[in-house]
Image: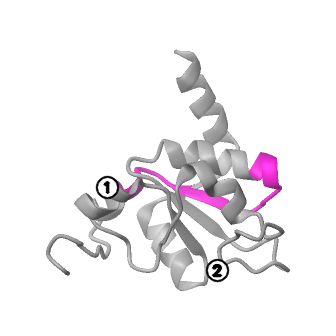
Amino acid sequence: MNEVSRLLEQARAQIARYSPAQAANALRHGATLIDLRPTEYRWRFGEIPGAVPVSRHVLEWRLDVTSPWHIKELQPDNQDQEIILICHEGYTSSLAAHQMTLQLGLTQVRDVVGGFIAWREAGYPILSRLDGT
């Protein structure tokens, strides 16, 4: 096993991972979904309704509720707010969820197994930028 695969395996062993069905259910109950995919992916493949797009390189600033750049969907007085990260295939989101737990002390950060691809294949809603749906 190469070093990156080992790192990914270790990260995943320390975070909760959701299936698309579990993520959709958590969203219905107030979780915040953060879409880490690059803009061109969201334009090309579509967006998940209600997801907050955040580039991975600014994620720490956007999830730190003490930062002036935190996303408005996060409540400053609720460190236990559930946050679900999604990327295209579920790799970047796993590493990012683990880092947010370690670096920011967030206790309810999850990711989606299989990422956006799995979400789409499970038949959950997607907004297409190309055709306006």
Residue drawn at x 70%, y 45% as measured from the top left: 99
Asked which secondary structure carries label 2, the reply is loop
Question: Looking at the image, which is closer to me, 5 or 131?
Answer: 131
Q: Position of residue 93 (x, y in %)?
A: 54, 49
Q: Amino acid type of disc 1?
A: Glu
The residue mark sitting in front, 1 or 2, is 1
**Residue 4 is one of the magenta-drawn residues:** no
The magenta segment: 101-118
Quarter containing the C terminus: bottom left
> In this image, 67 relative to 35: left or right?
right
Q: Position of residue 67 (x, y in %)?
A: 79, 66
Q: From the viewer's side, name the closer residue of 53 and 31.
A: 53
List the single residue furthest toward the top: 1
Residue sitting at the far left: 131
**Residue 103 magenta-highlighted:** yes
| Residue drawn at point x = 55 percent, y = 24 percent | 4
Q: Which amino acid, mark 2?
A: Glu
Residue 78's place in the image compared with 20, above or below, is below
In this view, the residue in front, 75 or 69, is 69
Q: Position of residue 38 (x, y in %)?
A: 41, 53
Q: Which of the labelled discs sits on residue 73, or is there none?
A: 2
Marker disc for residue 110: none
The disc, 1 or 2, on the residue closer to the chain's N-terminal end is 1
Q: Which mark is residue 40?
A: 1
Name the residue furthest front: 68
Relative to residue 2, is residue 29 depicted above or below? below
> Within the image, what quadrant is residue 75 found in?
bottom right
